[in-house]
Every structure is written in structure tokens, then in C-alpha cells.
Image (tube, rainbow, N blue to C red):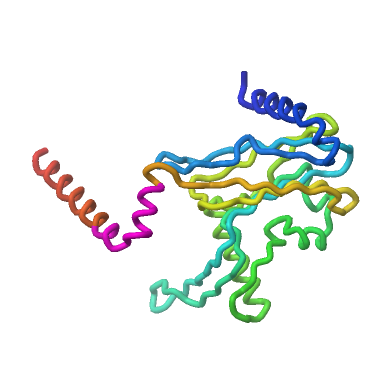
Amino acid sequence: MSRRLRCGLLALVVILGLGVSVRAAGLVADLSHHLIAITTAFTGSDVLLFGALEETGGDVVVVVTGPRTTQTVRARERTLGFWMPGAEMSFTGVPSFYAVAATRPLAAFTNPALRARHELGVDSLRLQPVSAFNPERIARFRTALIGLQQLRGLYPVELGEVSMLGDRLFRTTLPFPANVTSGPYQVQVLRIVANQVVEAQASVLTVSKVGLEADLTDFALRHGAWYGLAALLLAISAGWLANMAFRRS
């Protein structure tokens, strides 16, 4: 049995089990799991989101937002033939991860005002500069910040697909890359009809380091000097062992 078929059957079983809740709430959605465990062998993870609507019609949008942080973008300037750090700008409220999935392209059923209100799409993210600058400079650095996040795979360039299974059931797969940040992730599901959000549900997905990865991170945060010394000694030892092996060969 293929993975897609197994996921579809899982969604159907769970949704049928929540039939009473669906009729009462109008929109019910859930995740295949609410914890992504980051271990030393973590290479990314896919999370299945599935749900059901009481009424037919409209479009479904899923928005995943990671912990918000302050990030700084630095420009590079060529001076005397060398690339040197240039001007910089810091933004607050920057999602560490941001992804959107929908039944159709957002522009097909939403206007700019609605997208700005609900932060639908990277162009609608509310990224606030720490200091006041002219709008032209803010736009330039904002574009650079989004581009960097996309290069890192933290802001997927392509819109994810929400598949409708019949008139009321829907599902989508949310991919998370290996470099996701630990913390709580907000998963919003919106039903949009006639350019209005008529139903919404939010849930939390936790990304957390576990096992050796968590222990090393905790040690580095609590004992930074000792961690740095241990890393240095490990690097020296590895170099010495490699050198000895090379001499014997």
C-alpha cells in the first residue's frame, strides 16, 4: 500500500471518528503528529494535515508560521577589490519558518487587503524594521531577507497544494527541512468564501531537539567556554590522528 493511500485512509478514519465535532464546529482539522523530534540523524520531516468542512464551497488555506525572531540583513560592498560588510538592517517579527498551502493560487480568490490582514504569502508578511529608514531601502533589505530565507529552504518558494477529497474532506502535506528551528509552530487553517475568512482553526506543532542533540545544545548554552574548549580539542585530536594515518600509509 503506497504512502499516499495510507495517509488518505488515516485522514478518512480520523475525520469519520470526529463526525459529531465536524457538524458542531463547521471546520475541523488535525495533524498526523504534533511533535517533530530533531535528533543527530534528522534530515527533515513531513507532517500530514487533514480536515473536514460542514459546508461546501470556498477555498481552504493552510499557513504554517515558525517562532518569530529578530534578524539582521547585511549588504556586501566591494572595496579595493575585496568584498566587505556594508550597510545592514534588522527586522523584528520574522518567522523562522513560513509556508502556505491552498486549494488554488491565492490571487485567484483573495485580494491584497485580505492577504495583508492574515499574512497570506511572503509579500504580505509584517516584517518591521528596528530603526526608521526610507521606504525604498526597507523594501530592498526586506526582499533580501526573504530571498535568504528561501535559499535556506525555510520559506518554500512554491505554494503548497491542499487537495479536496470530495466536497468536504481536505488534506495537505507540510514539509519541514532539516534546518528548522526548535520551538512552537502555529498551524492555521482558513476557509475563505467570497474574499472573506468565514471559518478558521489554529493548532500548535512543536519542533524540539531530543537525545544527544538536545544534550549537546543544552551543554553549549550552559557551559559555552567548556563547549568551545572541547570542540577545539576534538578538532586538534582529529587532525593529529589524520596526520598519523597519512604518515603510516
Q: What percent of the width, then of the height, locates residue 211?
A: 40, 42
Seen at 59% across and 54% down, the residue is: 66
- Name the side, left or right, on which 246 lies relative to 132: left
- Name the side, left or right, on which 128 lies relative to 109: left
In the rendered image, the vertical position of residue 84 relative to residue 117, given as above or below: below
- Quadrant in which residue 147 is drawn: bottom right
In the rendered image, the vertical position of residue 241 relative to residue 120, given as above or below: above
- Quadrant in which residue 134 is drawn: bottom right
In the rendered image, the vertical position of residue 81 relative to residue 198, given as above or below: below
Q: What percent of the width, then of the height, locates residue 24?
A: 85, 38
The reply to whether the magenta stretch includes residue 220 is: yes
In the rendered image, the vertical position of residue 206 relative to residue 5, given as above or below: below
Seen at 64% across and 48% down, the residue is: 204
Residue bounds of the magenta highlight: 214-229
**SS majority, magenta:** helix
Seen at 22% across and 51% down, the residue is: 234
The reply to whether the magenta stretch includes residue 219 is: yes
How many labels sit on residues? 0
Seen at 78% across and 42% down, the residue is: 103
- Name the side, left or right, on which 231 lies relative to 93: left
Q: What percent of the width, then of the height, locates residue 176?
A: 56, 44
Viewer-proximal residue among 20 and 45: 20
- Name the side, left or right, on which 45 lies relative to 236: right
Q: What percent of the width, then of the height, locates residue 104?
A: 79, 44
Quadrant of image for the N terminus: top right
Quadrant of image for the C terminus: top left
Specify the farthest residue to the left: 248
Viewer-proximal residue among 20 and 215: 20
